[in-house]
Image (cartoon, coloured by chain):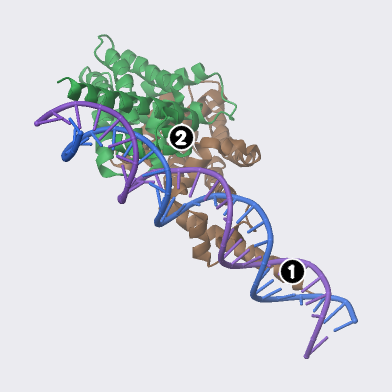
Chain colours: A brown, B green, C purple, D blue
Amino acid sequence: MGVQQRRERERAELREDILEAARGLFVKEGYENVSIRKIADKVEYSPGTIYLYFKDKADIFDTLCEQTFAKLRKRMQGIAEDTGDPLERLRRAGRAYIDFAIENPNEYMVTFVAKQERSQDEVDIIRLQTSGMACFDCLRNLVRQGIEEDRIRFTDVEEVSQSLWATMHGVAVLLITCCGFPFIEHSRLVERTVDIAIEGIRKR
Amino acid sequence: MGVQQRRERERAELREDILEAARGLFVKEGYENVSIRKIADKVEYSPGTIYLYFKDKADIFDTLCEQTFAKLRKRMQGIAEDTGDPLERLRRAGRAYIDFAIENPNEYMVTFVAKQERSQDEVDIIRLQTSGMACFDCLRNLVRQGIEEDRIRFTDVEEVSQSLWATMHGVAVLLITCCGFPFIEHSRLVERTVDIAIEGIRKR
DNA sequence: GCAATAAAATGAACAGTGTTTAGGAATGGG
DNA sequence: CCCATTCCTAAACACTGTTCATTTTATTGC
């Protein structure tokens, strides 16, 4: 009587297919330019079927965000749990954060620049925020270590953590959204900004 | 024969009315949630009429952005043309920039962030680039002065200017959009981030 | 093997979107 | 007074996210 189990497995497989198709489309075309019909076309089902597997379009995207969030935390956690100079690890963390944002621009924007009336669905916001807080904790821990080892000229962990986050966030958002601006080479801008921030908090 | 002139004046007035209505709606509801029909309703004309005054929805939006850029430039230019320690003026400029963003959150977001939603029309990007560039030039000039007076530990004006912009932008976007996050007192976060950036570029 | 049943997928429909266009109404010049 | 120009509108087109009655499909009990 493995019918039930096979049914569930097939359901999960189609759900995963939809997510995979959606991810490809979102990355290539951006959130607004992907329609449910396009996703349905790609998995060769009718539009209505999508709604048997996801509440709505935002639900698909949020699910993708959680998956990507997990990836980000994994990257950040690796650096946070590493050993070595805290300031050097903060530098690595800053780079890693911005790299992640640039590699997943659409997910990053919708997740961090929680825009328009997605805020109506408070449940989803909370859902994303809790998984996002896990990422911020990695940064907090790094800053705490830096302060404990007397490498940082401030004492307030929260203050420094939020300032650093804001700085990295700024580079990320700028590079993602202001495509028309004649930026210097991206990696150089990232490197310079991270460097300024690190030297700005270093104790001498 | 003042008919021609009256006609032109009336055309300009309706154009301005459309812009005013659109700004109010964009600010309140965001780019995607404002339809041409809503704008048309507000000025009490038919949707088709809008297209006699603007090429398309993005054209309306771009015009509003230009106006916002002009307001911001006015503020920044005052500091850029001032005298005194360049680093101190950079500090003031950073504060002024973030303050402007926080005082006009919707306009700021619409101008600097929301434009990612639109599929890029190259002509319009150039148009916004020029008016936005005027703002950025104020920052550039400040940085150039700082480098010329040997107060900054880097030599590349563009690199430092873009890094500083990214940092200020980050604080602004974060404070405007991530309302759910437990931030420290806003003014303290602004002050600390600006301070880190200034100390990060200072020559010693 | 066949009918009953439960699950899944569909496709049409609804209300909305940006944009285009054929044609009607108003106005000024000759 | 009539014609030409300008202005505006209403309808239409091709999209969008979403819902739902209906049909198709698969599984079960007999």
Secondary structure found at label 1:
helix
Quarter in which the N terminus of chain A is drawn: bottom right
- Camera-side residue: B100 or B65? B65
Q: Disc 1 marks which residue?
A: A5
Q: Disc 2 marks which residue?
A: B38
Whether B184 is drawn above or below A170: the answer is: above
Secondary structure found at label 2:
helix
In the image, what residue occupies the spot 55% across and 36% down?
A: A117
Residue A129 occupies which quadrant of the picture? top right
Amino acid type assigned to the residue bearing label 1 in the image? Gln
Is B93 situated left or right of A182 in this image? right
Residue A169 occupies which quadrant of the picture? top left
How many C-alpha atoms fall within 10 Å of the one at disc 1: few (<14), some, or many (≥20)? few
In the image, what residue occupies the spot 28% across and 23% down?
A: B139
In the image, what residue occupies the spot 24% across and 41% down?
A: B123
Is B99 situated left or right of A154 in this image? left
- Camera-side residue: A20 or D7? D7
Q: Are marks 1 and 2 in contact (CB under 8 Å)?
A: no
Q: CA distance from mark 1 to mark 2?
A: 50 Å
Amino acid type assigned to the residue bearing label 2 in the image? Lys
The location of residue B132, given as percent across then percent down, is 28, 29
The answer, for residue B136, to whether it is visible in the render is no
In the image, what residue occupies the spot 53% across and 41% down?
A: A111
- Camera-side residue: B96 or B149? B96
Whether A157 is drawn above or below A169: the answer is: above
